[in-house]
Amino acid sequence: MTGTMTINQAGHLEIGGCDTVTLARQYGTPLYVMDEEAVRRRAEQYSQSLRGLEDSEIIYAGKALLTVGIAALVKQMGLSLDVVSGGELYAAAQAQFPMEKIYFHGSNKSAHELKMAVDYGVGRIVVDSLYELELLSDILVQSNRECDILLRLTPGVEAHTHSHIQTGQSDSKFGFGIATGQAKAGVEAASKLPNVHLRGIHCHIGSQIFEVSPFKAAVESMMDFLAETNNAGYGLRELDIGGGLGIRHTPEDDTLDIEEYGQFLVKTVRQAAQARGLPIPKLMIEPGRSLVGEAGTTLYAVGTIKELPGIRTYVSVDGGMGDNPRVSLYGAEYTGLAASKMNASETKVYTVAGKCCESGDKLLFDVELPVLVPGDILAVPATGAYNYSMASNYNMLPRPAMVSVYQGKSELLVEREQYHDLVRLHRIPERWQ
C-alpha cells in the first residue's frame, strides 16, 4: 500500500483518513480517489532533490492528470505547469494559474492554440517543428507581441519502456532531431525570425523509466548540443530534460527514488557542463506520472461473478477500459485490493473484467484476492495518472467522479457524468425528424 493508505477498525481500506467503502457509498462507483498528502510529499521530494542547483524549475506535466482543481493544487504547491493543448491551457486559466509559469507543449499546435497561448501570455512555448516556429513568428508579428521559446529536440535515446511511450529516439514524431541536423537548423531559424526569443532546449525520452542510464545519455546528448550552439554564439542557458520517472504499479516494479533521481540529474548536469567548459544551465524537469500516479486509486463495485471450472473465475466490476484504458493499450499491470474486506483470510484467484462489450476489457489477471461477493468494493491503486486523462465514453458509459481526500475530509474534484451529459452536444438533422 502507498501514500496514506491504512486499514481501519472496520477492516476497510482507508485513504487520507477516509474510509473507501464510505466514499463509494457517498459518491458512487467507479470513483477516482486522489490522495492529496501523497502528491504534496512527492512535490516536496522533487524540490529537495534539486536543491544543489542555483537555478532550477519543477514543471508539472499536466497531461498525466489535469482538472481545474488539480491546476489549483499545482499553483498552491508553487510548481510550474506544462500543458499540451488549448483545452489544458483553458483549464489552467480557470484556476487562475499564473501564465508566466506555463510551458505550452504539443507536436502539432494549431494556429488557434498558438494565438491563445500568445494572448494568455504563457511563459514559454516549446516549439516542435520549423513549420510551427514560422507560424508562431507570424502570429507574434500580427499581434505585435514577443514570446520566449524552447526547442524540443530528439536526442536519439531509446528508453527501456513500452514502444508507445518512447519519445526520445531518432525515429519519433516529436521534435527536432539532433542527429539529422534538424535541431541545428531550428536554432538557426529561431535566431533569424522576428519576435521569438530562443532561451534553451527541451527533450523528453519517454515514460515509466526505472533506470538512470537513459537520463544520463539524454543529458550528455543535450549538453553536447548546447556546447555546439554556444560555441556558435547562440548563448542558450536553459535545459529542460522532461519527465519520465516510473512509478510502482505492482510490487515487482523497482522504481527510482525521487530524491536520488533529482540529485543524479544535478550531478550529471554539473559534470557535463564542467567537461564542456559551459556555465551550468538552468535545469527544468517535468514530473507528471511520478507526482500523481501512485496518489490515485480507483474504487469499483463488484457485480457478476462467473466461475469457469478448470479455467478461471471472472469477477466483473462497474468500470473497466472506459476509466482505465492503459491495460488494453499498453498491457499495463496493476494490483487489486478488496477495500471492503482487507482483513479477510480466505482468498481466491480472480481475473477482474470491466463492463464494456470487449473481450479485452480486463483490469487484473489471475490475482489473489479475498473471496468476493456482489457489492464488495474493489480498489485498484496507482491509477492517478493517464486514467482520467484518457478515459472515454465507450458504450456511452458516463465517466466517473473524482474526489480529493486529505486528513479525513473528502471533496469533489470532478462530478460524475450523467446520461444527459452524454447527449448534450448531439443533434438530429431536420430531414430525419
Image: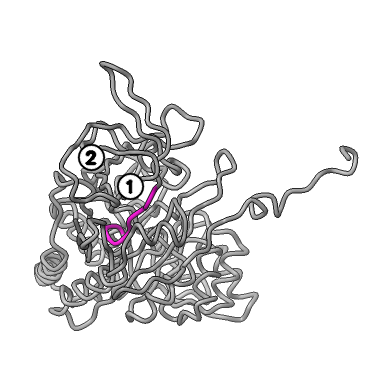
Mark 2: secondary structure: strand
Quadrant placement of the C terminus: top right
Q: CA distance from mark 1 to mark 2?
A: 10 Å
Residue 50: image location, x then y, percent: 17, 75
Mark 1: secondary structure: strand
Query: Total marks drawn?
Result: 2
Residue 231: image location, x then y, percent: 24, 70
Please say if 158 is above or below 227: above
The extreme front residue here reads: 10
Residue at left offset 50%, top offset 77% = 95
The disc at residue 369 is 2
Residue at left offset 35%, top offset 64% = 34
Residue at left offset 45%, top offset 47% = 323
Q: Quadrant of residue 243?
A: bottom left
Q: Amino acid at mark 2?
A: Leu
Residue 273: image location, x then y, percent: 14, 70
The magenta region covers 293-300
Sequence-wise first label, 1 or 2: 2
